[in-house]
Amino acid sequence: MNGTTAPREGGPPPNPFLPLQRRLQVLLDKSTPHILYRWLALAAVVCMYGVRVFFLQGFYIVTYALGIYILNLLLGFLSPQVNPELEGPTLPSKSDEEFRPFVRRLPEFKFWWSSLKAVLLGFTATFMPMFDVPVFWPILVLYWFILFFVTMKRQIMHMIKYRYVPFSFGKKSYGGKDGKAAKNSK
């Protein structure tokens, strides 16, 4: 008898959602290399959420909470895994020091997956009238922008102080013999 369907004595009951969880994990594993399509799918879901909120003219608290959560995820995405303030600088400050690559506190895939789950949860919340709290939304927008700019200013100052860039475009790329040969063959 299959161990996933039959209850075990003394153990926890079987998980009825296990086949669905496995299917979801397979889909997530297959989507990992398709970065552009994943982010386009997230953008489509965010647009659907925005259209729903626009036509309902409500759920501003849900949108505000969603915006703060995604801002928190963005900070984790832009931050190094090792905080140089606490453990000292890990990036080279002189030309003869060893190079250590930038490692994010929150990897790109987890940033995307957490954002997608949050937007889908917010979208689901728009179907529940108890979350439609009447507020003066321009104050929330203004407060969110102030929070965004203050937080990003602090993060950018941290990047400048410890000299790290969390993005790979615009960085120098060094190639050994293989890199030079590939450039010369073109």
Image (cartoon, grey):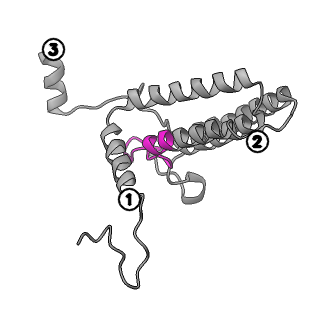
* Residues at circles 3 and 2 in contact by the CB criterion of under 8 Å: no
Quadrant of residue 16 within the rendered picture: bottom left
**Magenta part of the chain:** 92-113
Q: Which residue is mark 1?
A: 18
Asked whether residue 111 is drawn in magenta, I would say yes
Residue at the image position 59 percent from the left and 58 percent from the top? 86
Examine the residues drawn in magenta and state their main secondary structure.
Answer: loop
Q: Amino acid at mark 2?
A: Phe
- Could you tell which of marks 3 and 1 lies nearer the N-terminus? 1
Q: Please determine whether, in this image, residue 1 is positioned above or below residue 150.
A: below
Rendering coords of residue 169 (x, y %) = 41, 26
Residue 98 seen in the figure? no
Task: Identify the element where label 3 is drawn.
Answer: loop
Quadrant of residue 65 within the rendered picture: top right
Q: Quadrant of the N terminus?
A: bottom left
The count of marks equals 3
